[in-house]
Image: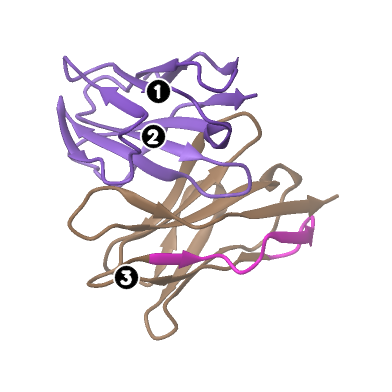
Amino acid sequence: EAGVAQSPRYKIIEKRQSVAFWCNPISGHATLYWYQQILGQGPKLLIQFQNNGVVDDSQLPKDRFSAERLKGVDSTLKIQPAKLEDSAVYLCASSSLRTAYEQYFGPGTRLTVT
Amino acid sequence: AQSVAQPEDQVNVAEGNPLTVKCTYSVSGNPYLFWYVQYPNRGLQFLLKYITGDNLVKGSYGFEAEFNKSQTSFHLKKPSALVSDSALYFCAVRVPRANNLFFGTGTRLTVIP
């Protein structure tokens, strides 16, 4: 079974630029998560989708971050405009409804904002 | 609100010795607890979980964890450490009424040959 795919793996941008990350979850997984992991910290949930609906986006800075999962499969996370403090690894994870608590993570996208 | 504490940033252990990585939690309602491991340049991997039942939970790669309700702890253990166990370990708790996870800050385990 293929794992969670993410791209790009690395991205360097200047502050105030925009950036987008892509995630393809494990086939058949209804739930998709985006986490932000700042160096030295644990992952923090940004947004959770079930199929193409948002379950939890309470920690998403909505003035600059947006995410979508239009067809209930792939997802994109966008930052516009980026700030220095957005430098982090952005992790995508997915889970099935049957094993909801076992989340499978992708390799992450390391974002550096200069 | 839920919280997870991993009191040790770093744990060093000699190869072949038993290892323990500590985790304490605070959550309303029944705790659902998890351990994940993160290797360099890779995503987190699920190790084990406690939902209900036996307090001793067995997981991947020979790891186990003991749920202690009175001490609100969920320490990760392994009887004999391997050099390949060196990684970053995260404890997590389910957020009540949601199917997502709240993670601790992580503990870096180094197994010394």
Element carrying mark 1: loop
x and y percentages locating residue A45 in the rendered image: 37, 43
Q: Which mark is residue A4?
A: 1
Looking at the picture, which amino acid does disc 1 mark? Answer: Val
Query: Who's purple, chain-wise?
Result: A
**Side (left or right) of B65 relative to B101:** right
| Position in image of residue B52 (x %, y %) | 26, 66
Q: Residue at x 43, y 46 (%)?
A: A44
Identify the mark at residue A104; answer none if there is no mark: 2
Res A88 visible: no
How far is mark 1 from mark 3, CA to CA? Answer: 29 Å
Q: Report helix, strand or loop for mark 3.
A: loop
Q: Colour of chain B?
A: brown
Whether residue B56 sits left or right of residue B53 in the image: it is right
Residue type (three-letter) at the residue carrying disc 2: Tyr
Residue shown at 37% from the left, 80% from the top: B69
Magenta stretch containing residue B10, yes or no?
yes
Do dots 2 and 3 share one subunit?
no
The chain identifier of the residue carrying mark 3 reads B
C-alpha gap between disc 2 and disc 3: 23 Å
Q: Which mark is residue B27?
A: 3
Contact check, label 2 and label 1, Cβ < 8 Å: yes
Reply above or below: B87 against A73: below
Residue at (42% x, 70% y) in the render = B25
Residue B78 location (% of width, % of height): 61, 60
